[in-house]
Image: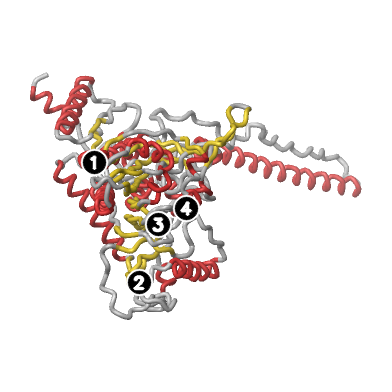
């Protein structure tokens, strides 16, 4: 083909920049038209035209005048005949109209039948748009976005879900990003078994009490009872630390910094939510040991900084880093740090990831002891830290809209999809080949630039269907722009989410300030307030705010479901202002305030 001919054929090629999701609409799954059902209303074939009225018998005139009785009879017969003729004519007119109406109704009924059939058999209709509104019915919207964008599917065990390639690809991007950071820092990957003996699990009293309600146990092998039930790991401290006790003998064996990518099972709750609260989930868990506390403290904050980067740099979700209260810290640990995200549509906080300093508690339980440089025996200092597939749910809840997924470019499995347009029945095979070649050249160029791109060359779907399909899945396509514009899009998403979060972040000095603590929560806000940090006071905050909400709605609180009462999310590292001498706790417990706590209803 000459260049002129090729250029001419390119005239039919149009690219469209896909924005995340389109208005909800039903789109046929295939281009082939469905068979037209029979008309719902058929012509009235069985209605016979009325017979013509029989003429009234003629009255033969006699030569002589008829008797009066005969005359009256003739008059009556004539009258009856006229009545019969009139009725027959009227019936014929009705039948004619019925036939006409039935004939006219048939095409309309025939045209309407496919829609009626689809409505009667909704399960078979292909609906790729989002019907529920995020702000009106958030749970249904969330379910539709996840399933119709092909992120996940439901499974027959409650609380467990199938991660489809579109979601698992996002998890792989998160894995790659975080794994690169920790490996550069000196952490090594490993894998430990998923089973833990009851004896090992019970060695750390506070730890096992914290997880006991969530532990799933294996009690049978085939039809035989096991001699000792075996737990499925809810976390791996008690799985890994017996080995650490063998491997760590001297200060020269430290630091030991291991991480594993695996699944865990936590069973006890009533209302599972995909990605946010599931009975089985994927995560990474790091377990490290150091000679001194300052080394352990430094790593806790280092890892927390990496988690913040996962959310803000990769997922464009703003988070608040801080320290958990004594009530909310990791069971058996010394202290817990966290990054807390915010879901504006529900007004709830959600824990993003945690980095724990375990202190020497587990080292004492599992006898992880080293001989120091001065020949003295001492227990090691340990940390653990974890990030889960909850990250995906938070991203969807924060960025998704009424059109579907909105994916940050850095985690989208496909950043660009090229859809060839303008192909009609008049397009020649030579022109089709030229369009396909040009489309593949565009994709190849994008891939060389490090952009994840593909062409949607399916010829059994219309461009409109393809646009709906990829928009629903949140592909951040901008064919006409380069990597710099894509980076700008990522920054814009973070700025937008940060602005929305900050608009819902309120600071008060006492419980009744302004609209009041509970009213601010009801308005879908997070609240910062000067707080004593005592567990008893935290219980009072939760009870007071929950009681007000229950009295208002009549809905009972579920301790594990999205919390009706407020709880402390963290004590932010960045305080809104300094606590002045003599400042009292906002809740009115009579204790002095220590720091501003971040409170909210949460997942």
Figure check: 430 above or below 498: above
The mark that comes first in sequence, 1 or 4, is 4
Reading the chain from its start, which is encountered first: label 2 or label 3? 3
Position of 479 compared to 362: left or right?
left
Contact, CB < 8 Å: mark 3 with mark 1? Answer: no
Residue under circle 1? 477
Which residue matches tag 3?
329
Distance Cα–Cα, label 2 vs label 4: 29 Å
The spot of residue 279 in percent (x, y) is 48, 43
Residue corresponding to mark 4: 206
Q: What separation in Å lies between label 4 and label 3 (alpha carbons)?
A: 11 Å
* Front label number (2 vs 1): 2
Disc nearest the viewer among 4 and 3: 4
Q: CA distance from mark 1 to mark 4?
A: 50 Å
Provide the secondary structure element on which disc 3 rests: loop
Q: Which residue is mark 2?
A: 529
Residue 417, given in percent of the width and then of the height, sits at 25, 35
- Closer to us: 279 or 521: 279
| Upstream in sequence: badge 4 or badge 3 | 4
Residue visible at 17% across and 33% down in the picture: 446
Disc 1 secondary structure class:
loop
Q: Secondary structure at mark 2?
A: strand
Residue 253 appears in which quarter of the rendering?
top left
Q: Residue at x 22, y 40 (%)?
A: 186
In which image quadrant can residue 152 be found? top left
Q: Residue furthest front?
A: 375
């Amino acid at each position: 083909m000459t260049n002129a001919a090729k250029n001419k054929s390119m005239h039919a090629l149009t690219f469209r920049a896909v924005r995340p999701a389109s208005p909800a609409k039903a789109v046929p799954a295939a281009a082939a038209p469905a068979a037209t059902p029979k008309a719902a209303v058929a012509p009235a074939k069985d209605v016979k035209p009325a017979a013509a009225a029989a003429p009234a018998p003629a009255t033969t005139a006699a030569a002589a005048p008829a008797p009066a009785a005969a005359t009256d009879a003739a008059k009556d017969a004539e009258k009856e005949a006229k009545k019969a003729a009139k009725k027959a004519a009227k019936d014929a007119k009705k039948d004619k109209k019925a036939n006409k109406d039935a004939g006219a109704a048939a095409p309309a009924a025939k045209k309407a039948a496919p829609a009626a059939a689809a409505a009667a058999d909704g399960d078979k209709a292909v609906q790729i748009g989002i019907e529920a509104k995020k702000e009106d019915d958030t749970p249904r919207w969330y379910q539709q976005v996840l399933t119709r964008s092909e992120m996940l599917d439901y499974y027959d065990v409650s609380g467990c879900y199938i991660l489809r390639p579109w979601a698992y690809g996002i998890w792989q991007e998160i894995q790659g990003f975080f794994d690169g950071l920790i490996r550069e820092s000196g952490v090594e990957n490993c894998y430990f078994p998923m089973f833990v003996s009851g004896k090992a699990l019970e060695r750390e009293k506070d730890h096992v009490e914290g997880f006991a309600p969530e532990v799933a146990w294996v009690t049978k092998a085939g039809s035989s009872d096991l001699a000792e039930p075996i737990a499925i790991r809810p976390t791996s401290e008690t799985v890994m630390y017996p080995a650490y006790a063998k491997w760590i003998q001297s200060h020269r064996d430290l630091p030991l910094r291991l991480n594993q990518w695996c699944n865990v099972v936590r069973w006890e709750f009533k209302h599972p939510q995909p990605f946010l609260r599931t009975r089985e989930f994927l995560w990474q868990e790091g377990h490290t040991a150091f000679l001194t506390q300052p080394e352990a403290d430094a790593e806790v904050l280092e890892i927390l900084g990496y988690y913040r980067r996962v959310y803000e740099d990769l997922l464009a979700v703003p988070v608040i880093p801080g320290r958990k209260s004594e009530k909310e810290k990791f069971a058996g640990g010394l202290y817990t740090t966290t990054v807390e995200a915010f879901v504006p549509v529900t007004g709830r906080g959600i824990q993003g990831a945690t980095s724990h300093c375990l202190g020497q508690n587990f080292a004492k339980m599992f006898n992880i002891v080293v001989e120091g440089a001065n020949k003295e025996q001492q227990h090691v200092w340990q940390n653990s830290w974890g990030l889960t597939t909850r990250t995906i749910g938070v991203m969807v809840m924060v960025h998704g809209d009424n059109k579907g997924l909105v994916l940050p470019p850095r985690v989208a499995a496909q950043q660009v999809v090229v859809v060839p347009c303008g192909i009609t029945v008049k397009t020649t095979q030579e022109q089709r080949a030229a369009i396909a070649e040009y489309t593949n050249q565009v994709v190849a160029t994008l891939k060389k630039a490090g952009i994840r791109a593909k062409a949607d060359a399916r010829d059994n779907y219309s461009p409109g269907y393809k646009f709906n399909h990829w928009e629903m899945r949140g592909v951040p396509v901008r064919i006409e722009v380069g990597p710099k514009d894509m980076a700008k899009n990522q920054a814009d998403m973070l700025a937008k989410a940060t602005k929305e979060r900050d608009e819902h972040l309120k600071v008060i000095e006492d419980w009744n300030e302004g609209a009041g603590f509970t009213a601010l929560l009801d308005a879908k806000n997070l609240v910062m307030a000067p707080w004593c940090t005592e567990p008893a006071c935290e219980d009072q905050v939760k009870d007071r705010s929950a009681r007000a909400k229950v009295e208002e709605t009549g809905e009972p609180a579920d301790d594990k479901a999205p919390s009706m009462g407020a709880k402390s999310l963290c004590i932010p590292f960045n305080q809104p202002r300094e606590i002045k001498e003599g400042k009292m706790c906002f809740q009115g417990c009579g204790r002095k305030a220590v720091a501003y706590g971040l409170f909210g209803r949460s997942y």
